[in-house]
Image (spheres, rainbow, N blue to C red):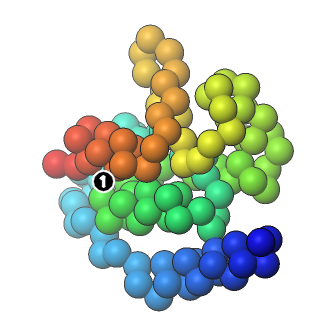
Amino acid sequence: MFIIRWILGRIILLVNALTPPKKMQRSPEQQAELDKLTASLSLYQYEACPFCVKVRRAMRRFNLNVEVRDAKRNQDYKTELEQNGGKLKVPCLRIEEQDGVRWMYESGDIIQYLEKNYVK
């Protein structure tokens, strides 16, 4: 089963690399302002997870600069996600808000949140 998942993961990464979505265009000033807003976001993910790829593609399409944290390869990120987020599940968007930190799971919810709050 490991070999099948590994092969499928590589296929997903290859297709993603060969067909990158086109980035949304903004003025440099608009992009700089948006980058300040997205500095409070972090995406916990696995490189070859299809749902994580879906979120990363949306972030690219929306031209959002969100820190990507690989919870599979980095033990600190894995521990942080599990202890603070409550479960070891990816993708997970960590959102720093004025009243604390919110952890959002589910790729569809993450994409909807990003589009609603950062795409204009």
Establish if 44 lies above or below 8. Answer: above
In this figure, which residue is indicated by the disc labeled 1? Answer: 31
Query: Which element type, helix, strand or loop, lies under badge 1?
Result: helix
Establish if 72 lies above or below 80. Answer: below
Q: Residue furthest bottom?
A: 18
Q: Residue furthest top?
A: 99
Classify residue 72 by image quadrant. bottom right
Across and down, in percent, residue 32 comes to 34, 49
Across and down, in percent, residue 88 comes to 68, 39
In percent of the image, x 47 and y 34: which residue is there?
104
Across and down, in percent, residue 98 comes to 42, 15
Establish if 26 lies above or below 112. Answer: below
Across and down, in percent, residue 114 comes to 33, 45
Instruction: Report if residue 118 is visible in the image.
Output: no
In percent of the image, x 59 and y 47: which residue is there?
90
Q: Classify residue 10 as left or right of residue 42.
A: right
